[in-house]
Image (cartoon, grey):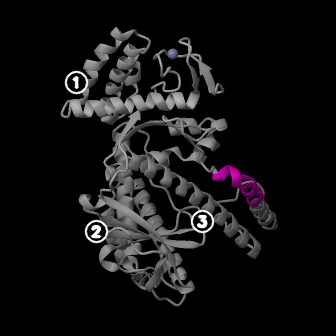
Amino acid sequence: MLLSHRIRLDATPAQCDYFARAAGTARRVWNWALAEWQRQVAEGLRPDVMALKKQFNAIKYAHPDWLDTDGRPWLRTIHRDAHAQPFANLKKAWSRYFVARKAGQPGYPPRFKKKGRCPDSFYVANDKFRVEGKSAVLPKVGPVALAEALRFPGKIMGASVSRQAEHWFLAIQVEMPDEIARRPRTGDGVVGVDLGVSAATTLSTGEKIAAPRPLRAALRRLRIRSRRQSRKVRAAKAAAGISGRIPKGTRLPRSANQVKGARRLARLHARISRVRADFTHKLTTRLCRENQAVAIEDLHVKGMLANARLARSIADVGFYEIRRQLQYKAQRYGTVIVLADRWYPSSKLCSACGQKNATLTLAERTWTCSCGVRHDRDVNAAINLQRLATGALAARTALPVASPTATSGTVAGMVPAAGGEVTPARYEHGHQDGSGQEEDAAHFCALFDSRMEC
Ligand SMILES: [Zn+2]
């Protein structure tokens, strides 16, 4: 299992200076390679990343663009990995783009990187560094103190050094043998998790876990700092006699105060992201550790973010990250993660009788079903999701090798007989990937069963 451990580096100022230069080199080489690629395409050639790399190696110690003012090749002061890896990254970026385009999905071609507008990072290959307790020996800079020792035993596959606000971090990729990566579970629960907006996360047990919503708390501060920053940019623009858009390639002078303000703003953003990461890690670990199956909604995050009124609270809770963490932690704890497809009306179904309340609006936090049961919106949704998890678990034990299509076919045939309030075809219609098929099919089974009990 490939896991990554990101550790803060307690680097000396000289080491930080090297990291910044290495990251800048990586960015510049990427931009060179991308520009060269685009130039070759414009000439009707078919560029190849490995050929580009050869081309670059031929000029990197000789071309005036890559020489110091005193004529020395500055690239020699930076470790090779930092300026070789951008080619591999560019190759990956283009192939991802072409694969997406071939599959008819929206693909995004690689873009130029801009200082201050892209993450600063560079790569170190696994044979070029080593970790010794609480220090890492990195090329060109020697031993750098680590904030903590590497926690994952296994084969080190590589590392990248990156910056967040004023700190540098070393993310080490470790290939851990599965038997070591496995963690013991403390419980065998089955839980549905409703990732809501106002009450944050609701479990089917009725428990509500409020997210710290660090962004909301820090929003006022963020507004003030951002406003101060943009005021300084505006002043610099006025001093340079520019109105409207800043022309491409212009470098506005940055005052000492502007640099200071930018650092402050970056620190605030970094703090927000740390609080958020702490919460999602603790939540997802707990869910995987205590349960044999966890059901969540496969929310259409991008679509929801397009809703301006919901966007901030959703982005603040970090839905996508929660799902990503659940999925990799599930492997370590042997937990089954059930993704309810995004058309599954978890909020609208009555968890007691299975009827669908089609008129339920987002503003209604509680509602009463025609069967007389009064529901808390989020708890009801979590219970419906828990049913999915139960069903998926049952399907897993009963039909270990059943193909997803066979399973959904059978169950889809069963459901209309149950009463017809839910039309499974509609929900199945929305599948983007096959992974949820089996789970969903199992759910209709569970729903069917529960309705029979009512
Ligand atoms: Zn009901």
Residue 438 magenta-drawn?
A: no
Q: Judge whether residue 127 can be spotted in this image.
A: yes
Mark 2 vs 3, N-terminal side: 3
Instruction: Identify residue for label 3.
Output: 116
Magenta: predominant secondary structure element? Answer: helix
Marks 1 and 3, how far apart at CA: 52 Å
Tell me the element at label 3.
loop
Query: How many numbered discs, if any?
Result: 3
Q: Amino acid at mark 2?
A: Gly
Mark 2 vs 1, N-terminal side: 2
Horizontally, residue 441 falls left or right of residue 263, namely left
Horizontally, residue 333 falls left or right of residue 73, namely left
Tell me the element at label 2.
loop
State whether residue 137 is above or below residue 285: below
The one nearer the camera, 305 or 104, is 305
Instruction: Identify residue for label 2.
Output: 154
Instruction: Identify residue for label 1.
Output: 406
Q: Position of residue 209 (x, y in %)?
A: 56, 44
